[in-house]
Image (tube, rainbow, N blue to C red):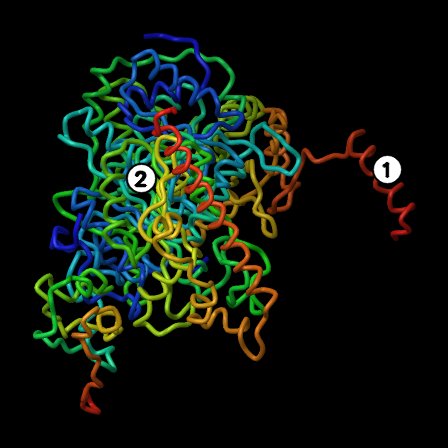
Amino acid sequence: MRLVETGNHVAAWGARLARVEVVSAYPITPQTQVIEEISRFIDEGEMDCEYIPVESEHSAMAAMIGSAAMGVRSFSATSAHGLLYMHELLHWAAGIRLPMVMVNVNRALGPGWNIWCDHQDTIAARDTGWIQLYCASHQEILDTTIQAFRITEDPKVILPVMVCYDAIFLSHNYMQVEIPDQETVDRFLPPFRSLWKLDLDYPLTHGAVIYPDDYEEVRYSMFQGLDNAREAIKAAAAEYRDVVGSFHGDMVETYRMEDAECALVAMGSMASEAKVAVDELRERGYRCGVVRVRSYRPFPREELRELLTPLRAVMVIDRSVSFGLEGPLFSEVKAVIYGHSDAEVYDIITGLGGRDVTYELMVENTEAALKGRLEQETRWPTVRLNEHHLVMKKGLEEYWKKEGVR
Amino acid sequence: MRLRDFPEDEVFLQGSAACQGCPGSAAIRVAFKALGRKTILAVIASCTSVFQSPFPLSALDVPTINMAFATGGAVASGITAAADRLVARGEFEEKPTILVWAGDGGTYDIGIQALSGAAERDADFIYVCYNNEAYSNTGTQRSGATPYAAWTTNTTKGKEEWRKDIPQIMVAHGVPYVATASLAYPTDMYNKFAKAKEIKGTRYIEIQAPCPPGWKFPSSHTIKVARLAVQTGMWMLYEHEGGKTTYTAGTQRIIQGQSKLVPVEEYLKEQGRFRHLFSPERDEVKIAEIQGRMSHIFETLQFTHKMKEHIMDIELAPPR
Amino acid sequence: MPKRKKKEEEEEIGFITTISVPREGSVGLTGSWRVFMPVLDEEKCNKCLLCWIYCPEACITKDIKINYDYCKGCGICAEECPRKAVTMIKEEKNETG
């Protein structure tokens, strides 16, 4: 069935087709349409699902952990401050080793209420043990949400999956999507399975006190689970293509990398824009390609190493920042090719708070890098003071004068 | 219900990490006598998280999930929704009891939001707060349940505020069943759990749990202190159902005139956490304040009770 | 550019998480915590069952047999017995025991 829909509504379709049975979620812009659509599906009898309108995101994650522990397919959705509010329990959800899928609409963080797109929210959760998959189109949101259940329920993985997509550009814009029918999805996705649950016939206790002598192995098991997820992600993408038909890459998606001397590396909808930049760069004689990081955790170590090692230069585009260091994707790209490659790696941080990332910006910066005119360090090329900033500055300066500060 | 009719089956397995005289393990034993094994248990960060013993052995013989401090009402909401799905699909013939076991910390303070949200949704589970009137697991810091004048590690001169009343807050939420219970009145506690088990929706039971190391009394006095709490009025036993409050057991006997209200001093003297009210000098002002409150509450209830009886007499007597 | 060492074979430890199995004596033979032990005078006992229901460790059976492997000697049974049928006696312990 072909629809023209928003990314949020399409994520709801993913949960519906995956036959999710419990949804616990709290509204936050720009995620609200996900849960509104799920509520509509339930109320109209199109989804056999319990929806718990919890009173906070921390409770949304707690409720999801509870329902997953009962052996039932569970789903949630959030964004930005909601993700941050449940941060404590993101670690718990991974550590409890139960399958769970949550959609996160990538939105900027306050203060300064900003409902537009950047990746700071999910990047800040990169160490929680969740698998993170980043989408660049509405079709990918639908497909990845369904694949996510397959990945999270893989017995060698059993770690929760976050399906990430950009605020507004993907959550609210309309695109054409192909919605597969239920029977097709049922052929791809078997019924829920996990490795333990709260079972009246076999009582077990989860989560008691654990001493230093026993704890590291629990964490190492999670670490190996994330490593095993690489195969699960690749298998899910390949099988989805065979059964349902669409494919968006697995750990990464590449564009014109076959003969490339330089790559643009980015995540989310910016990576689609990067394809336009690459076409323009090639017009100008530079053999460039795009490597879109789809799986951020587990990080595509082998894929990036293979693709980037022979190159002359890499331009990383970060839509978040690790304060006190540099762009996070920049650090991690360098880390995986360290010791393998002589490629020059460059970085721009841009697009924060929904600022538009244009292909012209990408072309300009990549060309400058290739011409040897840039340092191999994080740069913020779109930062500039405007009238609003000047109003604010003036206001504070008046205050400082009044208070005798400075 | 009499003690001899209590089932022998133990869900709590001896040889646990509980302190000598622990009220928490004593309470969980009685609760499970009434609820039985068809129960899913969520233990919220508290002493119970520890006394169930460390990985890989457990003193709890029911399916148990330990959860983070602020999550009581929320994790139960998820478990109960999933259980509904399993019933709808035919995997459960009968829905099991969902039980949250939390301390006063996880209920009065950090857990109040999740509990309130769940209660407003009338989520179907039993929430137990076993109340030792402090954050005992972390070494006896004050909580919203710590009574006026009690010593804790961060109210070393005695708490200056009176405590919150979560059972009354739950009554205000309009949930189908709210009750208070005491270790010293086990048949009363059993009856309340047995009743709660048969009701659907959010049910709240709060058990006062006198803690020997935290309240500073000998481990053999746990039940004695619990009894004195009821006899002096410092802990009231009641249940609230269908818009009506009924006082029970020891509290009922005081209100109906069968027992006299014991002076509050008898209760306070037993506990090291109130020692500063007696030594080096008696703090007559504070003792009088506490006694005043107890006396006022019970005089009012005794008066109301007498009025009801009196009115009943008038109605029943034929007109002359 | 430094050459990378070959990755050592990692031990696949499988699924390890904080799951505990229910067991009596989960923290060991807690009877060793005792200083005083409860002794029952069966002649005085009328099987009121108060000690059974009050025991925080569930180590008194319904027919009033005390399990000394686990009894921690808290003294509640002795304190609460209406017939004073239980007495707390200081235990003789080996220095090494």
The residue sitting at 26% across, 28% down in the picture is A238
Badge 2 or badge 1: first in the primary sequence: 2
User: Hey, which quadrant is residue B178 in on the image?
Assistant: top left
State whether residue A131 appears in this view.
Answer: no
Which three-letter amino acid code belongs to the residue tagged 2? Answer: Gly
Q: Are marks 2 and 1 in contact (CB under 8 Å)?
A: no
B134 sits to left or right of A43: right
**Mark 2 sits on what residue?**
A66
Which labelled disc corresponds to residue A326?
A: none
Which three-letter amino acid code belongs to the residue tagged 1? Answer: Lys
Query: Which element type, helix, strand or loop, lies under badge 2?
Result: helix
Whether A374 is drawn above or below B286: the answer is above
Q: Nearer the viewer, residue A69 or B50?
A: B50
Q: Position of residue A223 (x, y in %)?
A: 32, 51
The residue sitting at 34% across, 29% down in the picture is B316
Q: Are marks 2 and 1 on the same chain?
A: yes
**Mark 1 sits on what residue?**
A394
